[in-house]
Image (spheres, rainbow, N blue to C red):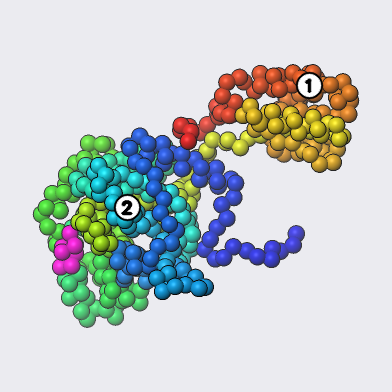
Amino acid sequence: MSQPLFRTPKGVNDTLPADHQYMTYIKKAVRHRARQAGFKRIDTPIFEYRAIFERGVGEHTDLVEKELYLVAPKTARDEEADLALRPELTAGICRAYIEHGMQQLPQPVQVYAIGPVFRHDRPQKGRFREHYQFDFEIIGLKDPSLDAQLIHLLTKIYDDIRILKNLRLQVNNIGTGENRRTFVEAIKEFFIGKERNLPPIDQGRLQTNPLRLLDSKEEDTQIILKGAPKLSQFVDDASKEYHNTLCSYLDALNIPFSDNPHLVRGLDYYTQTVFEFWDSSTGAQNAVGGGGRYDGLIELLGGHPTPGTGFASGMERVIWQMKEAGVKVPQKDQVDVFVAQLGIEAKKKCLTLIAHLRDKGIHTIGALGEASLKSQMRLADKFEATYALLIGKMEVKRKTIIVRNMKEGKQEEVPDDRALERVIKLLGEGNLDTYTHRDQMVPEFDQD
């Protein structure tokens, strides 16, 4: 076997048909729950002005400083010279909310999105430099019940796709922007004289974004932080009350969670509620999804002060979790009928028959080359076809078609003008497009 001339760039991944079955199923679960809860679909451009992410996400976050992919058109005008591929979906959705006057709609506005994001990150298990997310946002109203509803919605999606039992919800309240600014000053003062004991990556964070030290994965940093001021000491009473109310709602919804004072998340726009779903065995190293409130983001992007809350979940990580849990998705690409033929006249009949079968919703493929019938039947076996229809030279003369049950090895010869009717009866009359799903391992959702 020859070596390929080209391979995918580092950190990106081909989504092959087997994984697309998972992708499609996750999207259906997301759309199903979105419709139930009154969320409308929104799609924003894959690239935006870089300033949207610098101002909204945070100029000194890892995402902007290290992971942003810049777009450089060959003949860029001045206003096009500073574009970036989106590293997340929330900032673009908030830009769209402002630009299209969505504040005039009934509030809150509930939208969701599914699409690719791009981060020049170190490739990890279930995370690539181009990866897909589904994202839900509620904009225009602030209430802990909305945070609880979002968390409940995400738990239902994870439960639908059978991974919830392997995840643990982490919840925190990081207070207001003023609370965090006071805390940051206290952290900087605490680390005076201790900077050299920090790993290089956290020495940089201390200068640009000290809040990120709280969720550092570096062991030396975590040891030093044991004696540092705690964020909870600087969170105001109103934020604490907000958090206690949210926790009471989660209890009412029977959603288990851990109250995690170290959880901060990596984007500057978060205020008050933050949450993540962690792999129960590996913890924060494999967060599957999360979100929180961003009550100051729309104002930062030029809009009127408008509260918002939302979450996003990485689809590749969800697929990894599903495979680890042994979850099988419904197989909708199963071949119902394989049509085999031999000779020019048989091929003509084959083409017409395939077209009629597909029009009836029957998943049909045909071998239209010059291979022998024996070779074609081996191919039918490889496709795991339920039935095979054989049209040879003798069948053309007799105006018949052989219908073969591939699993049982039984076959019958029927008149060619009754073959379609016979196949429909064998497969099961009714909704032919869904009859193959009687052995599903996960629930089926309504079709789009």
Q: Is residue 206 left or right of residue 179?
A: right
Choose the circle earlier in sequence order: 1 or 2. Answer: 2
Element marked by disc 2: loop
At which x and y percent is residue 36?
Answer: 35, 34
Location of residue 179 with respect to 404 vertically, above or below: below
**Residue 177 belongs to magenta span:** yes
Classify 10 Å Cα crowding around label 1: few (below 14), some (14-19), many (20 and above): some
Q: Please report the bounds of the magenta region as a residue range.
A: 176-183
Q: Main secondary structure of the magenta part?
A: helix
Residue 163 in the figure: left or right of residue 21: left
> What residue is pinned by disc 2?
100
Q: Are marks 1 and 2 in contact (CB under 8 Å)?
A: no
Q: Amino acid at mark 2?
A: His
The reply to whether residue 68 is visible in this rendering is no
Kindly identify the residue that appears in the image at 47 percent across and 72 percent down.
76
Q: Residue at x 71, y 19 (%)?
A: 422
Percent x, y for residue 336?
66, 30
Q: Which mark is residue 147?
A: none
Task: Please give the name of the residue rendered at 44% of the width and 58% of the height, measured from the top-left corner.
Answer: 46
Q: Residue at x 72, y 32 (%)?
A: 354
Q: Which residue is mark 1?
A: 416
User: Residue furthest toward the front?
Assistant: 77
